[in-house]
Image: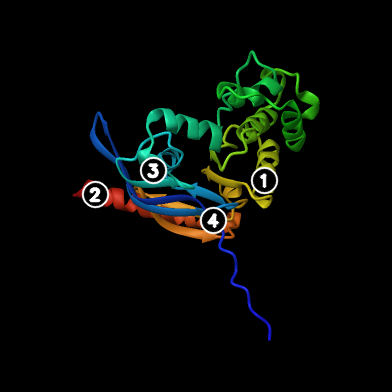
């Protein structure tokens, strides 16, 4: 008699429970997030999309502890963000999270290898040069370790930023429009790299406006007016584009109706 095994449950890397976020602007109170619930499994690649002003970057920032949500709960693994003071939150971001931004955020006076190792040095830890060289090899830049950022193409600089995000072996990599400033070929290289990282078990959460970029993910979440309104599993670029077009049209119709009132 054979005994069936219960499938091992994939651990949760990020749990967002009913978060709201509000801030004041010149035109009054802005409700950027309105009760968002989200779970991301370890090793999952999730893309976040939505019209301008939908709350996607705010969601990314709250999930990463860069902003504190006005209400609700964010758990990064076993860490409850609201329970951490600023010192412990900063330590968590340095040691367990990686960040990749559209603007690269590399220091121009430092070499590629020194830019990659910067998070470790800022944390007061000893760098492992062999690990750094290995990371640069994984992103295809081992031969450019001694170059300065201004000696690299945009795609190469973004790959340096990805290596820097990985140097602390983070629980999650957060990427905000990582291909927004790149040409098509460089963007594909970066997306292939992110997809390969996810295939090896790295958790990635990416905000993007590009349906092609979103198609590299495992799941796409669509936001509108501060809420997750739909999602696509195993997305393709055409379906993502059609979903976005329909969502934008719905938002525009709702805005027009509100103006008429």
Q: How far, Cα to Cα, is label 3 from label 2?
A: 19 Å
- What residue did someone put label 1 on? 197
Mark 3 vs 2, N-terminal side = 3
Residue drawn 62% across the image and 38% down it: 169
Residue 229 visible, this orientation: yes
Residue at label 2? 258
Label 1: how many Cα within 10 Å (few below 14, some 14–19, many 20+) = some
Residue 149 shown left or right of residue 223 in the figure: right
Q: In the rendering, at what x and y percent does residue 54 appear?
A: 38, 45
Q: Could you tell me residue 229's position as x and y percent?
A: 39, 57
Per the image, label 2 sits on a secondary structure element best described as helix
Whether pointer 1 and pointer 2 mark residues with C-beta atoms closer than 8 Å, the reply is: no
Instruction: Mark 3 and mark 1 in contact? Answer it, CB < 8 Å.
Output: no
Task: Measure how far apart labels 4 and 2 are at the Cα level.
Answer: 43 Å
Earlier-in-chain disc, 1 versus 4: 4
| Image height of 200 relative to 141, above or below | below
Q: Contact (CB < 8 A) between labels 4 and 2? A: no
- The residue pinned by badge 3 equals 55
Which residue is depicted at the point 28% across and 49% down?
256
Q: Which colouring convention does the figure follow?
A: rainbow
202 above or below 23? Answer: below
């Amino acid at each position: 008699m054979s005994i069936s095994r219960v499938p091992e449950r994939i651990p949760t890397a990020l749990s967002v429970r009913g978060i709201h976020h509000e801030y004041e602007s010149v035109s009054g109170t802005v409700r950027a997030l309105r009760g968002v619930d989200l779970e991301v499994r370890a090793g999952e690649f999730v893309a976040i999309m939505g019209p301008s002003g939908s709350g996607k970057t705010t969601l990314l920032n709250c999930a990463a502890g860069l902003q504190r949500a006005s209400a609700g709960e964010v758990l990064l693994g076993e860490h409850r963000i609201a329970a951490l003071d600023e010192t412990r939150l900063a330590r968590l971001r340095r040691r367990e999270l990686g960040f990749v931004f559209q603007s690269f955020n590399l220091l121009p006076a430092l070499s590629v290898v020194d830019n990659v190792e910067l998070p470790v040095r800022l944390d007061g830890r000893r760098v492992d040069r062999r690990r750094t060289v290995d990371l640069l090899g994984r992103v295809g830049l081992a031969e450019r370790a001694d170059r300065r950022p201004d000696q690299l193409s945009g795609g190469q600089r973004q790959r340096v930023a990805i290596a820097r995000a990985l140097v602390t072996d983070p629980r999650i990599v957060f990427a905000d429009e990582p291909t927004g400033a790149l040409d098509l070929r460089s963007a594909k290289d970066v997306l292939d790299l992110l997809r390969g990282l996810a295939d090896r078990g790295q958790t990635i959460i990416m905000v993007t406006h590009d349906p092609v970029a979103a198609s590299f993910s495992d799941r796409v979440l669509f936001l509108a007016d501060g809420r997750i309104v739909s999602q696509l599993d195993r997305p393709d670029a055409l379906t993502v584009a059609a979903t976005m077009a329909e969502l934008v049209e719905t938002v525009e119709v709702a805005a027009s109706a509100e103006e008429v009132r």
